[in-house]
Image (cartoon, rainbow, N blue to C red):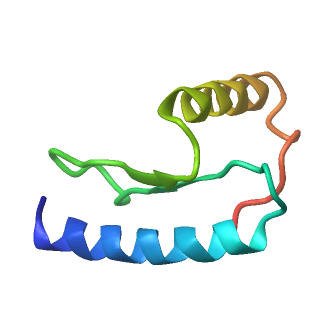
Amino acid sequence: MTEREEQANDVLQAIAKEIKEKLPENMGFALLAYEFGNIEDRRMMYVSNSNREDVLKAMLEFVDKNLNNPKIFGKDV
């Protein structure tokens, strides 16, 4: 892991702790982080309070719904 990725990982872990504390009980989340642009060997990082299988299922649902109806979810920040 590069120094930049380690820094991002530390921030993701800190944010994840806050999200987990603020969400109602029994709610899962996944937070994705990635670099903009076409960077060689770009890695997407994520942190979650869920099992990998549950995150993949949620991501597939998100992608499917957005491909079929892009206005279904909220706005970008």
Q: Outermost residue, front direction? A: 25
Answer with the quarter of the image where residue 23 lies: bottom right
Q: Outermost residue, right direction? A: 72
As displayed, is residue 57 above or below residue 17?
Answer: above
Where does the image place residue 67, in percent across and percent down from the top left? 71, 25
Give the residue at x 79% y 22%. 68
Nearest the viewer among 67 and 28 is 28
Nearest the viewer among 34 and 56 is 56
Give the residue at x 67% y 32%. 58
Where does the image place residue 52, in percent across and percent down from the top left? 49, 33
Where does the image place residue 77, in percent across and percent down from the top left? 69, 69
Query: Could you tell whether 51 is left or right of 34 in the image?
Result: right
Give the residue at x 26% y 76%. 7
As displayed, is residue 40 above or below residue 33?
Answer: above
Give the residue at x 16% y 45%. 41
Nearest the viewer among 23 and 71 is 23
